[in-house]
Structure formats: C-alpha cells, structure tokens
Amino acid sequence: MRILSVDLGTSNTVAVLSAHGRPPRVVEVDGSANMPSAVFATEDGTIMVGRDAERRARLDPTRFEPNPKRRIDEQTLLLGTDVIPVTEVLAAILRRVLDETTRQLGGELPDEVRLTHPAQWGQTRRTVLLSAARLAGMGGNLVLVPEPVAAAAHFASFPGKTLAPGQALAVYDLGAGTFDVAIVGATPNGGFTVVAEDGLPDLGGLDVDQALLVHVGREVSHKDPQRWQRVLRPESTPDRRTRRALQEDVKAAKEALSRHPQTEVPMPEPFEDVLVTRGELEALVRPSMLRSVELMSRVVRSAGMTPDRLAGIYLVGGSSRLPLVGSLIAEKLGVVPGSLDQPETAVALGAQHVASDGISSRTQGVEGQVAAGTGAHQVGPGASGPYAPPPQQVASIPGYQGAGPGQSGGFPQTGYPNSGPQQVQQPAPTNFPTYSLAGGEAGDNAKAGKKKPLVIGAIAAVVVLIAAGLVYFLTSSSTTTYTADECKTPSAADDKGLTGCLRQLAGKIADTGDCKPGMGNGPAKPAESLGVTSTCSAPGRAGTQVTYLQSDSPEKLKSYTDGLLTSAGGDRTEAKWVGNALEGQYSSAAGQNAAVLVFTVTDRPLVGFIYQVPAEGQTPTPGELADYFEKSVQPGE
C-alpha cells in the first residue's frame, strides 16, 4: 500500500512516502526534504510554489506570500492585483508535493494521503485543508492526523521508546507560525490520545526573526533613519527586494546561532553588517520562550500530572532547535527534553506510524459537502466500517494514579493506535473515564484558550480533574485578568486612577509607581478627555512618567498616541510585546524635544506611553527607550 503523509507547515512543507513494503522516507522536492510553503502568483494566473516562488519574489514581492498557512482563516489572498481563494493557494502547495510523489512512484497515485494539522484546529480549518487536498487531486482516501499524535507515534517508533499504557508524553511543538503543546497518553489498546492541549498563536520562528530584525535595526538605523524606514516600509519594488533579502539573511543568522556562538547579518547599503551573538538572541527571545515553557507546565498540571511522571518531553518543529528552549525546559521543569530526529520531519514521519483504523471523531469530524465529496473518513455515532470510532467502552490504565488519595484515573480512549504491535482490544470495564472533547469554532478563534477534556465518566476522574484544577489555581499567578469584552468600557477607577483593566496593563507599576489619577499638566496633556487616565513615576528613571489610558473610543486613543509619536519626530522602533495575559505592539520615537514610547493592546482600548523631556544633550535613542520598556515597564507574566 502506498501511503503519503504531508505536514503542511507555516514556513516549510514536509512529505513522507511508504510504498512497496519499504520503510517510510522523506520525499525530496527540488532536492530538499523541506519545501518552502511559499507561493507566488504570476500575471497569467499560475501559482508557483516552493523555491520557485521564492526566486520569483525578488522580481515582484507584492505577488508573493511566504506563509499562506497563517492566512487559513481568510477566504481570499490578494497577490499583486489578483484575488485568489485560500483553498487554491494551499492546493497548489499540496499539488506540488503530489506531483513529485507521483513521479517517484512511476506515475501511480498514493492509495492513502494523511494530512497533519494542529490539535487545536476546529472543524472550519480542517474543512479548508480537506478542500485544498481534494482540489490538489489527492483522491478520496484522505485522513487527518493531529500533529501531537503523529509526533508521539514517531517518538514511540524508536527502539526503547514505546509508551506503555498509562504513560504520557509531552509534545513541545515550536514551528514557524505557532507554538503548540499537548500531553499525549498511551491507551490500553496500543493507541494514543490527546489528554490536554494548548498553544500560543503569536509565538513561532517568524516572531524570533522579527525580534532579531528589530535588534539589528537598533544597531544601524541611526546612520540613515530615513533609509531604514524605507527598508521597514518599502514603497517601491527595489525597496521590497531589499527588505525580502534582509529577512532571509536575518532568518539565516538565527539558524546559524543554533550552531555557532556568533554570526554576522549582512545589511543593505549604506548600513554596515551587524555581528550578533547567541547570548544577544537569547536575551531577545527569552521572555517569549519562557511563556511557552510556563504554558507547557500549566498543561501538564491540567492533565493531572507532574513533569517527573512524563515518559519524556519531545521537541518538534524547526524553531525548537534554539538551544535556549532545551535549557529553559530543563531549568523550569526539571526534565531534559529530547529530539530523536530532525525536528522538522518528525510529524510527517510519525503520521506514517498512526494506524488509520484508529483515526477517531476527534480528528475526522468533518461533516457536510466537503467531507462527502472528498471521501474523508466519516466517523461519529452510527458510523460503521474500518474508520468508525471505537465502541464507547472504557478501561482502567494500570500505573496511572489520579491526584486524589487512592483514586485511579486514566486517559480518555479516543483510539490513536501506537506504532508498536497492536494489542487485541478486550471488553473493558466501565471504571475508565471518557471525555467530551472540545473543538469546533472555538478551536479556531480562541487565542490561547485551554481545551481541557470534560469529565462525563466515573466519579474518580472528576476528583482527579478537580484536584488538578486546585493545584493550578494555587500555583498560578495572582494577577487578576480581564477579557476583551470586560475592557471595552472603562469601569470605576480606584484612588490611583486605575481600573481593573489598567491595573492588568500596568502590572507591578500599579503598586510601586506612585500612580495618581489624570495626566498632569505637562506637554503630553491632551486637549480633551480621553477616558480614564493614570500617571505613574517610571521606575529607576528620574523625570520620566508612564501614563495609562482606557477609553470607549479606540479611535481617540490612536489619534492621540499617533500625535505623540509624530511630535517626537526622529527615528522610530517598533516591536510586539506580551505580558499579564495581554499582547500588543509598542512604538518608540525620539527627537530633540521629547522621547516617547507608546504601547497598545491588540484587542481592547487600553494604551500606555512613556514620555520623557530629555535634558540638554541627553536625548535617548528609540532603541534605548525600547530596552527600558522591555526591562522595566512591560507587564510581566
């Protein structure tokens, strides 16, 4: 049987083929195991992919999309002047893989195609992926496999790594576009199940690239601020080519720092090349990587486990090569993670080891016309045949103890078979808990919402989850967090002028910064009321203030803060920030009369700004102000 598995990633796509009784092997496209997931739309309507697309991007970058997977929630893409459906773009990538596979098979098509996807993807995204596969001509025998399940199957395929029933593996997946973590457990019938999962949609290799780009910009932009702004915001084709080349060089430098202690980033004229060290890169990305490790720790707890009880922590995804990732995991969790193979190919290889007769409704619940048209395996109540879900019988797992004294627990039996010899499934007793698994549209739209199993089985499992939740509650941060809806309209402020939402933005400064209501009478005072405001002294920086604003008019806030940055003049630095369950962007500008850094929140009308009237001859650079914000003002986790 000819089986093709495809891991369509944000930056690269990997395909693995098993045929004619031979072991699975990576399908090399254009001479490489990793085919760029990039696309380029020619003027005659042809969609070029991979390295051909990257080469054509130098001619007209407006027709180029390097990371189409990040655009899966959009119906169409604008490439040049052409509006192209997302399904056609993804289909072009899959078609290139299929064409090369068919060529290597002597003109024959695969009997089965397995497509991997993030475990958090809901029905809508899975449907788009199946539609693209159908459009690519991949046939009717399509199977979807969650990426952590494939990774666990790959881990278990190595000698001495088979997971015994009751054991669990943490899969740390840091790709180019997102970070995903999952606890995958081995079930008594030789299968796998996702016990708990979560992710960060704003963390990946692309974000590391951006941080490094901002860093080198701080080093050189002072030489020619206007030219640097043209590199960051290209308006002409030559400028777009320059930016594209710089992005590629920054990415190459990041990858080199995984192997070497230092490297140089080639810079466009008139700027000099920048020497960067591994220590500098790690300092830039440490807060973000720490977020991922802390999230993994919370997911482990949500599964009712502790790190020392895991069978291992498995690193997958190209960005997990950063040495900082392994050291942070070992430091914070006390477990040394492992990477048994090329992290980029682990998921595609693992999908080959997942027996297709165990794919369950957790993975294959795609209903409607697409599923019917593509022949995707149908499962669910009443389904029959080899791809029907296993009977709703449950079994206890020996060796897996719950959190409560004397309580037994286990993993939900959703039936992802292991790669080892398959055990004969015996009728199971009813003391093994089953779970209702979250998914659907919430899985597509939640930024980092937890998707924990809901107990519908035995009382013992309820005790396990309650105890795990209590542990999480007692060990999690005491910072009160608010939803975007709760922050749409300012609530009553305290004696410092801070609402609950502003306190979340201010972090520790709310308690240590001598905050007072209002904006004072300085040059930053607006001509009209913007909403609730509070001004605090900036830590460790005499003569500098941090002001926090909350309004029911985001337009007013943007107009006011844009004016602050414009009035400061000079060069400008921009980057993303995260902290206290918030995320956003900051912009800093510095001129002769003022230095300003504005930090906004992505999904709510909250903003803060640092305003400094410098002493004569002591104007800080935008980069220095950005460094100060990141170290002293940015709210912590």
Image (tube, helix red, strand yellow):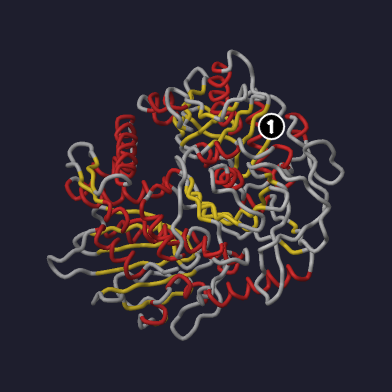
Examine the rendered structure and indicate whether residue 29 appears above or below residue 620.
above
Determine the image quadrant of residue 270: top left
Q: Position of residue 460 (x, y in %)?
A: 75, 70
| Quadrant holding the N terminus | top right
Q: Few, some or many C-alpha atoms within 10 Å of disc 1 (few <14, some 14-19, many ≥20)?
A: many
Q: Position of residue 176 (x, y in %)?
A: 45, 44
Examine the rendered structure and indicate whether residue 28 appears above or below residue 442.
above
Q: Which residue is under mark 1?
A: 142
Examine the rendered structure and indicate whether residue 532 appears above or below residue 257.
below
| Quadrant holding the C terminus | bottom left
Examine the rendered structure and indicate whether residue 415 appears above or below residue 468.
above
Looking at the image, which residue sits at the far front?
A: 160
Looking at the image, which residue sits at the far right?
A: 382
Q: Which residue occupies 48% across, 52% down?
A: 202
Q: Which residue occupies 51% across, 77% down?
A: 478
Number of numbered markers: 1
Residue type indicated by callout 1: Leu
Looking at the image, which residue sits at the far bottom?
A: 495
Q: Which residue occupies 61% across, 48% down?
A: 119
Q: Is residue 559 visible?
A: no
Q: Position of residue 333 (x, y in %)?
A: 46, 65
* Left or right of 151 on screen, residue 413: right
Q: Which residue occupies 55% across, 37% down?
A: 348
Element class at badge 1: strand
Q: Which residue is more in the foreground, 19 or 399? A: 399
Q: Which residue is more in the foreground, 72 or 494? A: 72
Q: Which residue is more in the foreground, 250 or 608? A: 250
* Left or right of 501 on screen, residue 405: right
Q: Position of residue 73 (x, y in %)?
A: 59, 43
